[in-house]
């Protein structure tokens, strides 16, 4: 089976083969994307929740994103997602996404159910007539398995469209000055870029990804590698 189109309230996206999209409410407004190999359970290794929000709620969402530097606000955000302890918070940033603007904030934290380390990426995607609240969570030690399918789905989201439009391509960036991480970014059809996250190659002393092998093959799970300067900071 090939890709299928997911039509939501004010947005559309492409659902790849073997992935799932599950409704979290009786009206089907809030959904969760699960890449192949993940599941809907406490301690799910990878997911993206998708929730349409009224445009008038966008300022409040942006307040919460910008307030992540405040320990109290950051902890409230984290606990609402099942994270018991925040270990690092990345800077707030904005970039073209989904035919609108994506406001991005990410943090690393310990899952309250499993004790595993997660990278949580919060995105408020704002178009002219609709807005989306996205939450992507990935177990850091398994990012090599799930990051590409999750970002491929996120890149396919278009706001206020009746069907999919030309989607960004994904690119992995290796920075010779930051050899402990690899950055993933979306490259839009107009060549503007949206740096999404930079993932660590080691967690403690454990290597979670062999970047040298990918440099030799020229890709990470099918995503091309380029040499450049990282815009996103690794948090762990």
Image: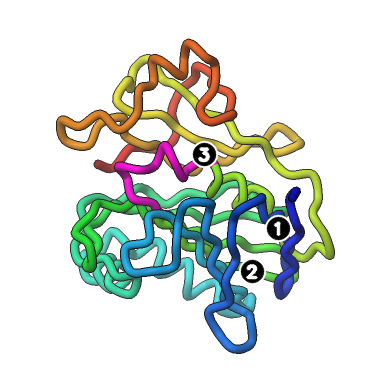
Circle 1 residue: 13
Dot 2 alpha-carbon crowd within 10 angstroms: few under 14, some 14 to 19, many 20 or more? many
Is there any visible trace of residue 128 in the rendered image? no
Q: Is tag 3's residue or tag 1's residue first in the polypeptide sequence?
A: 1
Q: CA distance from mark 3 to mark 1?
A: 20 Å
Comparing labels 1 and 2, the label whose residue is closer to the camera? 1
Dot 1 alpha-carbon crowd within 10 angstroms: few under 14, some 14 to 19, many 20 or more? many
Query: Considering depth in this image, is 105 or 200 the residue closer to the camera?
Result: 200
The reply to whether callout 3 and callout 1 are in contact (CB within 8 Å) is no
Q: Is residue 9 left or right of residue 166?
A: left
Residue 154: horizontal and vertical position, in percent?
60, 52
Comparing labels 3 and 1, the label whose residue is closer to the camera? 1
Residue 136: horizontal and vertical position, in percent?
46, 57
Q: Is tag 2's residue or tag 3's residue first in the polypeptide sequence?
A: 2
Circle 3 residue: 195
Assign a secondary structure to mark 1: strand
How many labels, in total? 3
Name the residue: 29% across, 70% down: 82
């Amino acid at each position: 089976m090939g890709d299928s189109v997911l039509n939501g309230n004010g947005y559309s996206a492409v659902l790849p083969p073997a992935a799932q999209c599950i409704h979290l409410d009786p009206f089907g407004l809030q959904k969760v994307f699960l890449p192949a190999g993940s599941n809907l359970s406490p301690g799910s290794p990878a997911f993206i929740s998708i929730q349409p929000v009224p445009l008038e709620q966008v300022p409040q969402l942006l307040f919460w994103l910008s307030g992540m530097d405040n320990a109290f606000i950051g902890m409230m955000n984290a606990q609402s997602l099942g994270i018991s302890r925040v270990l690092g918070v990345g800077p707030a940033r904005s970039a073209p996404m989904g035919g609108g603007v994506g406001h991005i904030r990410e943090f690393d934290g310990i899952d309250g159910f499993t004790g595993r380390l997660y990278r949580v990426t919060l995105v408020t995607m704002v178009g002219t007539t609709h807005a989306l609240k996205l939450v992507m969570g990935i177990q850091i030690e398994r990012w090599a398995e799930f990051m590409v399918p999750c970002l491929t789905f996120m890149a396919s989201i278009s706001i206020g469209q009746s069907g999919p439009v030309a989607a960004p391509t994904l690119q992995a960036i290796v920075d010779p000055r930051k050899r402990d991480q690899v950055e993933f970014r979306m490259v839009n059809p107009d060549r503007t870029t949206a740096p999404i996250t930079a993932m660590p190659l080691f967690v403690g002393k454990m290597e979670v990804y062999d970047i040298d092998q990918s440099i030799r093959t020229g890709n990470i799970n099918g995503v091309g590698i380029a040499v450049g300067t990282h815009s996103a900071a690794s948090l762990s």
